[in-house]
Amino acid sequence: MFSRRKKGSDGADDEAAADEGAADEAAADEQSRPPLGPRDAADVRDDGVDRVDLGGLQLAPSEGVELRLQADQTTGAVQSVMLAMAGSALELRVFAAPKSGGLWDEVRREIVAEATKQGGTATESDGPHGTELRLQVPVKASDGTTGRQQTRIVGVEGPRWFLRGTYLGRAAAEPDPDGPLERAFRDVVVVRGQQAMPPREALPLHLPPDARPRHPEANGSA
């Protein structure tokens, strides 16, 4: 809608009032928006959301997304979390980080160097969480043929923690800002804890408290 501007000082006053009103409206809108996650546990206390407790990570249930835990076959320790849905997946790994920040900058350089060493490519781009990486790395299939795997890696730094999210499949090739995996990533809560840890050490993860490992039957079947 267009309005006719008044002449003289009254017009200037009206324009200033309109600008002030627009600024107030924008500020109110900004305050009403939820902060862009992932977030620190201290910022979500008593928010009423029932999250899955995995130790260093807490995840809000997301319809259509399957939660998988990837554990070390030797020690049984949980190393990463995988969120999967048809054609896409998101791997989450969380680490201790220095108070000064800057760990994502270091990690990006290392990832780029490793991808290049493997004969792949790495491209930086701007995303909702800042600088992210898009990789294409040669991989050999089970039938002996060689293809290229595309991944998209996002890094978020919080108070003494660093969260790395690696998108696979369709979520890497065709990012959807409103897709289930993107929403799940924004809903992640990191529990750093007070223990002293060197930068880059993985935060401890574990099975949810109500999860029970499967025990073999007497006949030895799983």
Image (cartoon, rainbow, N blue to C red):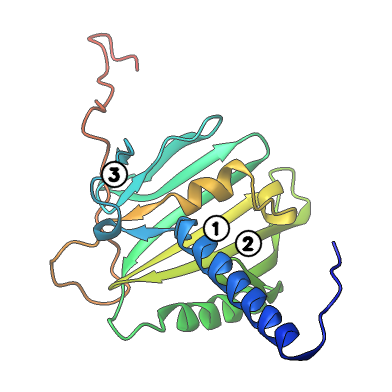
Measure how far apart labels 1 and 3 are at the Cα level: 18 Å
Q: What is the residue that sits farthest to the top in this orientation? A: 219
Asked if labels 3 and 1 touch by Cβ distance under 8 angstroms, the answer is: no
**Between residues 199 and 220, which one lies in front from this camera angle?**
199
Residue position for label 2: 152
Amino acid type of the residue that numbered disc 2 sits on in the rendered structure? Arg
Say if residue 190 shows up in the picture: yes
> Which residue is located at x 46 percent, y 77 percent?
104
Q: What is the residue that sits farthest to the left in this orientation? A: 195
Is 209 displayed left or right of 161 in the figure?
Answer: left
Q: Earlier in the sequence, mark 1 or mark 2?
A: 2
The answer to which quarter of the image holds residue 56 is bottom left
The numbered mark at residue 166 is 1
Quick one: label 1, few (<14), some, or many (20+) residues within 10 Å?
Answer: many
In the rendered image of this protein, does residue 163 appear above or below residue 78? Answer: below
> Which residue is located at x 35 percent, y 53 percent?
189
Counting from the top left corner in percent of width and height, residue 89 is at 58, 45
Counting from the top left corner in percent of width and height, residue 31 is at 46, 62
Q: Earlier in the sequence, mark 1 or mark 3?
A: 3
Amino acid type of the residue that numbered disc 3 sits on in the rendered structure? Leu
The numbered mark at residue 54 is 3
